[in-house]
Amino acid sequence: MRTRFARGAETRLRIIRVAADLFHKQGVRATSPDEVIEASRTGKGQFYHYFRSKEGLIHEVLQVHLEAIKSGTALVKYELGSWMDLERWFFAQVELQKSFGMTRGCPFGTIGNEVTENDELIRQDLSLIFEVVKSKLAVFFIREESQGRLVRAADENRMADFCIAAIQGAMLMGKITRSSQVVETMVREALAHLKGYRTGSKKA
């Protein structure tokens, strides 16, 4: 028999998952607490018991995204051991977007698009997510550099920043144009640029 604590944890997680999907689908501002409550089949008392406010819910959604990236359980894999893994990282996000008919962008990037100067907690949450993503990408480039596979002009942190900016911009363009071809073209261009820093490349 499940304990009251276990049932409460399941309810809380269900609300977070429903909210994450709604935020990804239609954005934060277009999603009301009442809509989350209805879609998660919970009560208003339960919602405010676990989250206190909509901002609290957004914070928890972003914490779930962060932990998934850290633990390797996210839909997109962030542990890179080869250039093939880097290609998979880019194209996995293209495939994720295609699975939604090009109607959605990055799950946490979508939230970031709505951040204002008054959303400091949310901005900090997003900043931490991007820092973790950047560090995972940079680790790969640092390893490549240490093994002499990158030219001296390569800057691992800038390359990691470039990866994030490239995929975020590509997914935004894909969402706006509803075209996977646009995203795939931008990804290929990004990969060509990055591979130009490999020793023995034409760019090198």
Image (cartoon, helix red, strand yellow):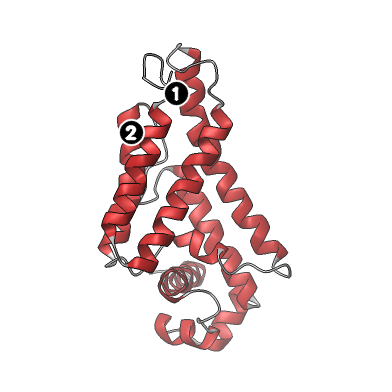
Q: Are marks 1 and 2 in contact (CB under 8 Å)?
A: no
Q: Residue at x 66, y 60 (%)?
A: 123
Q: Residue 50 lies in what quarter of the image? A: bottom right
Q: Quadrant of residue 52?
A: bottom right
Between marks 1 and 2, how big is the CA–CA gap? 17 Å
Give the residue drawn at x 67%, y 69%.
116
Residue occupied by mark 2: 85
Say whether residue 73 is visible: yes
Q: Is residue 88 left or right of residue 45?
A: left
Q: Nearer the viewer, residue 120 or 98?
A: 98
Q: Which residue was labeled with disc 1? A: 197
Q: Vertically, is 79 above or below 122?
A: above
The crowding category of the residue bearing disc 2, from other C-alpha atoms within 10 Å (few below 14, some 14 to 19, many at least 20), is some
At label 1, the amino acid type is Tyr
| Image location (x, y in percent) of residue 173 | 40, 61
Q: Earlier in the sequence, mark 1 or mark 2?
A: 2
Whether 147 is drawn above or below 130: the answer is: above
Disc 1, SS? loop
In this rendering, the answer to whether 115 lies above or below 160 is below
- Between residues 147 and 185, which one lies in front from this camera angle? 185
Q: Nearer the viewer, residue 132 or 56?
A: 132
